C-alpha cells in the first residue's frame, strides 16, 4: 500500500530533511523510530566536507584509539632519515670515499736496503772482527721514489671529486626515502580514515537494524526483509575487520622505513587526509628542479670527476725517478755511492688510459644531459598527475559527495516511513559507501601525487 503514496511521501521526506526538523519521540511507534534515525543520519552525514576536510573529519572518530605515540609526517621523515638501515649503509660510502682520499694523498715510502756478502760460513775460524773487517762486504742503502707530473695532487683531486659525486648520490637516496615515507604515511592515513568510516557506517546501519526490528514486530515489514538487513550487516562488519588489517599493515610498512626501534609497536599516525590546492606554474617547478635535484647534480659532478681522471691519467704517463744512496764497507775500506733510475717512455706512455678517460668524459656529458632530460620529464609527469588528481577531488567536493550523503539520509527516512523498498535502502547505502571510499581514495591519490611532485623537484618546498 505504501508504494501508491511513494512520490508524495518522498517529497515530504525531502522537505523535512532540508529544514532539519526532528520528529517527536515515541517509544513504541516504528514511524517515530524512523524519524529518529533520519535525524541521526542528518546530524552525522548531512554536510559535505570542505576541500581540506574528509568525511572522516566530518564525523566523530570511533571511541577506541591507539594508546601509543602519534607521529606526524615530518616526524616520520626525520626518523627515517636518522634510522633507516639502508640509508645508513649508503652513507657509509661517503666515509669510504674519505678514506680513499687519505690513501690518494699519501706519499711513497722511502726504501731501506742492506746486505752482507762473503760471510765465512764454511770457515768458522775467520769469524773474528779482523776477518770480518777484511773479508766481508757490508752494504746499507736508502732510496726514494720521486713522483713526477703531480701524481699525488691529481690523485687527491680525483678522490675528492668522487666523494662529491657520492655525497650527491646519498642526498638522492634521502630524496627517494623521503618520498617512500610520505607515500606510506598517506597510505596509513587512508587506512585510518577508511577504518573510522567503516566503524561509523556500522554503527549507523546497526541503528537501521534496530528500527527494522521494531517495524517487524509492528508488522510493517516482512521477516524476509529483516533477514536481508541482518545479512547486509555482515558487509559492514567485514569492512571494519578489513579496515583494521589494512591500517595495521600500513603502520608496519611505515615502521620498517623509519626503523623498528624508533617508534613503539602501538604507535599511530597523526593528521587527516586533506586537500591543499596546487600552486605555481610548471615552468617554475621545472626550473627549481634543475637547481635542486641531487641526481642531476651528481651527474654534473660526474663530468668534473671524469675530467679529473684525465688529468690523473696524463700524470701517470710521466715516468717516476728512483734515487738511492748506499754505504759500503769492503776490505776494511768504507765508501758511498748513489744510484738513480728512470724508465724511458718509448712504448708505454699510458696513452691507452688517457684515451679511455677522454671517452669517459664524453660519456659523462651525455649522462648529465640525459639526467637533465629525466628531471624535466619527471617533473612534467608528476605535475600532470597532480593536476589531474586535483580535478577529481574537486569533482567530489563540488557536490557529488554531498549528493550521496543526502540521498542516503533521504532514503533512510523514506524507508523507515514505509515509502521505499528494502532494495532502495540497500542501493542507497551501497552508493553512499562507494562514493565515500572513492573520495577518500581520490584524496589520498592526490596527496601522493603531491609527494611525487616534491620528489621530482628534489625539495619539499614547492615554488
Image: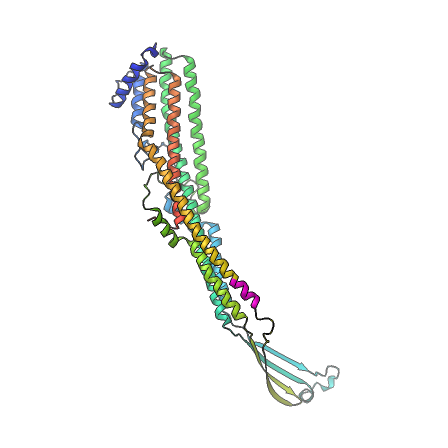
| 78 relative to 38 in the view: left or right | right
User: At 44% across and 24% down in the image, what residue appears?
Assistant: 234
Range of residues picked out in magenta: 350-358
Query: As displayed, is residue 249 above or below residue 409?
Result: below
Q: Quadrant of the N terminus?
A: top left
Residue 54 or residue 134, whichever sits in front: 54
Identity of the residue drawn at 33% across and 46% down: 281
| Image coords of residue 97 (percent x, y) | 49, 61
Rendering coords of residue 266 (x, y %):
42, 40
Tell me residue 330's x, y (percent).
66, 87
Vertical arrangement, residue 341 with respect to residue 390, above or below: below
Work out whether residue 54 can be spotted: no
Tell which residue pokes out farthest to the top in this image: 1
Say whether residue 162 is magenta: no
Residue 194 placement (x, y as % from top left): 39, 33
Quarter-of-image position of residue 326: bottom right
Amino acid at each position: 500500500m505504501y508504494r501508491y503514496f511513494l512520490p508524495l511521501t518522498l517529497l515530504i521526506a525531502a522537505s523535512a530533511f532540508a529544514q532539519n526538523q526532528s520528529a517527536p519521540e515515541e517509544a513504541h511507534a516504528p514511524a517515530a523510530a524512523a524519524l529518529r534515525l533520519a535525524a541521526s543520519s542528518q546530524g552525522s552525514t548531512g554536510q559535505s566536507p570542505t576541500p581540506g576536510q574528509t568525511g572522516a573529519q566530518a564525523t566523530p572518530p570511533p571511541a577506541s584509539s591507539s594508546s601509543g605515540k602519534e607521529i606526524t609526517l615530518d616526524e616520520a621523515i626525520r626518523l627515517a632519515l636518522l634510522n633507516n638501515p639502508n640509508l645508513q649503509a649508503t652513507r657509509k660510502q661517503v666515509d669510504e670515499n674519505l678514506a680513499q682520499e687519505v690513501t690518494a694523498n699519501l706519499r711513497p715510502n722511502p726504501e731501506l736496503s742492506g746486505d752482507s756478502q762473503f760471510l765465512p760460513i764454511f770457515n768458522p775460524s775467520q769469524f773474528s772482527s779482523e776477518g770480518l773487517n777484511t773479508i766481508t762486504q757490508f752494504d746499507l742503502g736508502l732510496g726514494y721514489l720521486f713522483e713526477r707530473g703531480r701524481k699525488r695532487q691529481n690523485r687527491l683531486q680525483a678522490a675528492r671529486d668522487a666523494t662529491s659525486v657520492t655525497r650527491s648520490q646519498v642526498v638522492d637516496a634521502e630524496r627517494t626515502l623521503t618520498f617512500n615515507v610520505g607515500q606510506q604515511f598517506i597510505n596509513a592515513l587512508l587506512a585510518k580514515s577508511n577504518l573510522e568510516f567503516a566503524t561509523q557506517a556500522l554503527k549507523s546501519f546497526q541503528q537501521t537494524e534496530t528500527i527494522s526490528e521494531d517495524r517487524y514486530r509492528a508488522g510493517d515489514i516482512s521477516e524476509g526483509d529483516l533477514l536481508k538487513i541482518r545479512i547486509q550487516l555482515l558487509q559492514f562488519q567485514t569492512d571494519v575487520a578489513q579496515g583494521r588489517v589494512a591500517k595495521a599493515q600500513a603502520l608496519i610498512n611505515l615502521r620498517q622505513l623509519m626503523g623498528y626501534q624508533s617508534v613503539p609497536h602501538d604507535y599511530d599516525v597523526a593528521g587527516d587526509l586533506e586537500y591543499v590546492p596546487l600552486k605555481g606554474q610548471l615552468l617554475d617547478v621545472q626550473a627549481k628542479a634543475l637547481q635542486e635535484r641531487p641526481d642531476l647534480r651528481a651527474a654534473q659532478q660526474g663530468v668534473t670527476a671524469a675530467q679529473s681522471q684525465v688529468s690523473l691519467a696524463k700524470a701517470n704517463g710521466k715516468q717516476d725517478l728512483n734515487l738511492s744512496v748506499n754505504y759500503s764497507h769492503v776490505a776494511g775500506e768504507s765508501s758511498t755511492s748513489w744510484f738513480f733510475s728512470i724508465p724511458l717512455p718509448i712504448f708505454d706512455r699510458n696513452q691507452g688510459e688517457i684515451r679511455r678517460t677522454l671517452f669517459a668524459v664524453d660519456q659523462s656529458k651525455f649522462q648529465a644531459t640525459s639526467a637533465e632530460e629525466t628531471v624535466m620529464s619527471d617533473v612534467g609527469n608528476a605535475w600532470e598527475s597532480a593536476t589531474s588528481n586535483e580535478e577529481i577531488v574537486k569533482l567530489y567536493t563540488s557536490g557529488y559527495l554531498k549528493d550521496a550523503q543526502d540521498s542516503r539520509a533521504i532514503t533512510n527516512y523514506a524507508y523507515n516511513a514505509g515509502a521505499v523498498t528494502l532494495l532502495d535502502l540497500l542501493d542507497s547505502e551501497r552508493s553512499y559507501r562507494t562514493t565515500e571510499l572513492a573520495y577518500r581514495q581520490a584524496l589520498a591519490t592526490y596527496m601522493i601525487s603531491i609527494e611525487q611532485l616534491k620528489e621530482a623537484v628534489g625539495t619539499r618546498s614547492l615554488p
